[in-house]
Image (cartoon, helix red, strand yellow):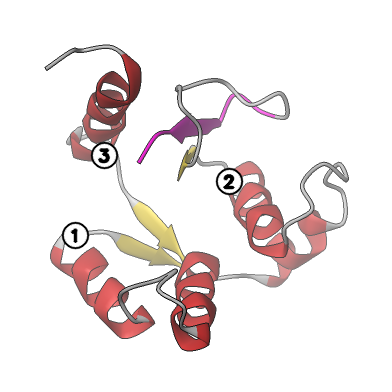
Amino acid sequence: MSTGGAYGVRVKARRYIRAPQNEVYVSAASIGEISIKHGLGGGNMPISEEEAAEYFAQAGYMTLDISTQHAIFVESLPSHHADPFDRMLVAQALSEPMRLLRCFQPTVTRSSLSDRQLRCQR
């Protein structure tokens, strides 16, 4: 298997997640998005929010609740963050501060908004 491309990115993402010095959090916003997508059906989300939360807990991930500070921070974000769940994740990452690891881009890059947002391929 090649170490470049999507596979190489997944390896980098795993390194961030598995590094013993890093604490891994899953946002309550992500659990909410899973719940909505699973509830709507259509095969977009094959597991429920309860199953996802259980998997995250088994992996040792902590939950990051949505605070009033996070909600207020959302308004200050640039308009290119249109998706409400994405806006909340970015607001949480910037106001905590934390790194945001999102799986939707083909490469690991630094966000134009912040060096705390990393992207990875699924």
Q: Which residue lies furthest to the bottom in this view?
A: 39
Q: Is residue 120 magenta?
A: yes
Q: Residues within 10 Å of mark 2 (few under 14, many from 20)?
A: some
Q: Which numbered disc flags the more N-terminal residue, 3 or 2? A: 3
* Image quarter of the C terminus: top left
Circles 2 and 1: CB atoms closer than 8 Å: no
Q: Is residue 20 above or below residue 74?
A: above
Residue at 47% across, 81% down:
35
Q: Is residue 101 above or below residue 61?
A: above
Q: Name the residue under label 2.
A: 93
Q: In which quarter of the image is residue 4?
A: top left
Circles 3 and 2: CB atoms closer than 8 Å: no
Near-viewer residue (20 or 117): 117
Q: Which numbered disc flags the more N-terminal residue, 2 or 1? A: 1
Q: How far apart are marks 3 and 2 (CA)?
A: 15 Å
Q: Mark 1 points at which residue?
A: 60
Q: What stretch is highlighted in magenta?
A: 114-122
Q: Mark 3 points at which residue?
A: 17
Residue at 74% across, 66% down:
71
Q: How crowded is mark 3: few (under 14 residues within 10 Å), some or many (20 or more)?
A: some
Q: How far apart are marks 3 and 1 (CA)?
A: 10 Å
Q: Give the number of marks.
A: 3
From the viewer's perspective, is 53 left or right of 95?
left
From the viewer's perspective, is 1 left or right of 63?
left
Q: How far apart are marks 2 and 1 (CA)?
A: 19 Å
What amino acid is at disc 3? Ile
Q: Position of residue 22 (x, y in %)?
A: 29, 38
Residue at 30% across, 76% down:
47
